[in-house]
Amino acid sequence: MGRTKVDTLDAAGGLFLDSLLDKSANTVLAYRRDIKKFTAYLREQKITSLQPIDVTCIQGYVAFCHRDHASARSIMRSLSALRAWFNFLVHRGEMLHNPALRINVPKTSRRLPRTLDVDQAISLLEQKPVTLLDIRDLAMWELLYSSGLRVSELTSLTLGGVDLRSREVRVLGKGNKERVLPVGVCAQRALEKWLNVRSQFLRREVVVEAFFLTRNGCKMSNRSVQLRLRLWARKYGFDESLHPHMLRHSFASHMLESSGDLRAVQELLGHVNISTTQIYTHLDFQHLAKVYDQAHPRARRDNK
């Protein structure tokens, strides 16, 4: 008995999104948003099924996005989501071909990520914590800069994922890919201080595996980390546009500047190169730890 054909755009979108079991929650959310915007455009064009969708239709949508002042990067991301959706539908036999395959968007010059210089990073991290929240916040900033975590990796970190004796953290990155990262001495000390007071954030008889907690004893959200860093920046005279990913960018920039080892930095960041022409070289953890200890400005710094 064959599969039932989908008869609506919403049903086709729902089937695709339900199939993304190996994707992160953020990726699924982005796909959902892009497909929702595209199907809303189709309805405005009186298109309510898959059959009329062709190359001309996709080109019209790209033109619509341009008129709506979407950036080239945003449009390319949307096209990537649509290609993935249509590939899924072609595989299911719902469409004969993928109409988005040969649609291109003129590339714009890539904006370089903003970073702190080494002195700024050290100044940010050498502020003396006064409150329990300060102790937690400083531990988060140290770890973000020490190990180049994404904010989602920071908030998803568990007690079992932190080994301070070995100076390692185990994180789950994009695509549910796990990696083990070295932790610098300064970050290690900050994390130890946080662990010494963490129990004061817990409610009685409640077990929370999240490493970082809110004042109510709950897992930190990405947004709460962003707001705390903005508050920290304001408090200590830094640019209030400072955000967690800037610490990750700074980690990458400073590591690369000091070591020149592009592939080691790529591995530490958990970046997957999608270019089929570039060979991805896996580096073992011992090599990563060695590069890290030699290159990171706060890996060995004696901060007594």
Image (cartoon, helix red, strand yellow):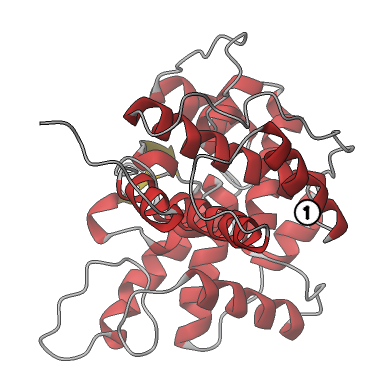
134 vs 166, left or right, is right
Residue 300 x/y as whole percent: 56, 43
Q: Determine the residue positioned at 76% across, 39% down.
A: 59
Q: Identify the residue shown where x is 84% and y is 39%.
A: 110
Say if residue 285 shows up in the picture. Answer: yes
Determine which residue is flagged by label 1.
Answer: 65
Q: Position of residue 256 (x, y in %)?
A: 71, 30
Secondary structure beneath dot 1 equals helix
Q: Quadrant of residue 125?
A: bottom right
Residue 272 vs residue 49, the one in the foreground: 49
Quadrant hosting residue 8: bottom left
Picture coordinates of residue 233 (x, y %)?
73, 76
Q: Indicate left or right for 45 with 168 as reference.
A: right
Would residue 175 appear left or right of 145 to someone viewing this image?
left
The answer to whether 29 is drawn above or below residue 198 in the figure is above
> Label 1: how many residues lie within 10 Å, few (<14), some (14-19) or many (20+)?
some
Left or right: residue 222 versus residue 214 is: right
Q: How many marks?
A: 1
Q: Amino acid at mark 1?
A: Cys
| Image x and y of residue 128, in percent | 61, 77
Task: Tell me: residue 160, above or below residue 180.
Answer: below
Above or below, 2 relative to 176 = above
Where does the C terminus fall, quadrant-wise? Answer: bottom right
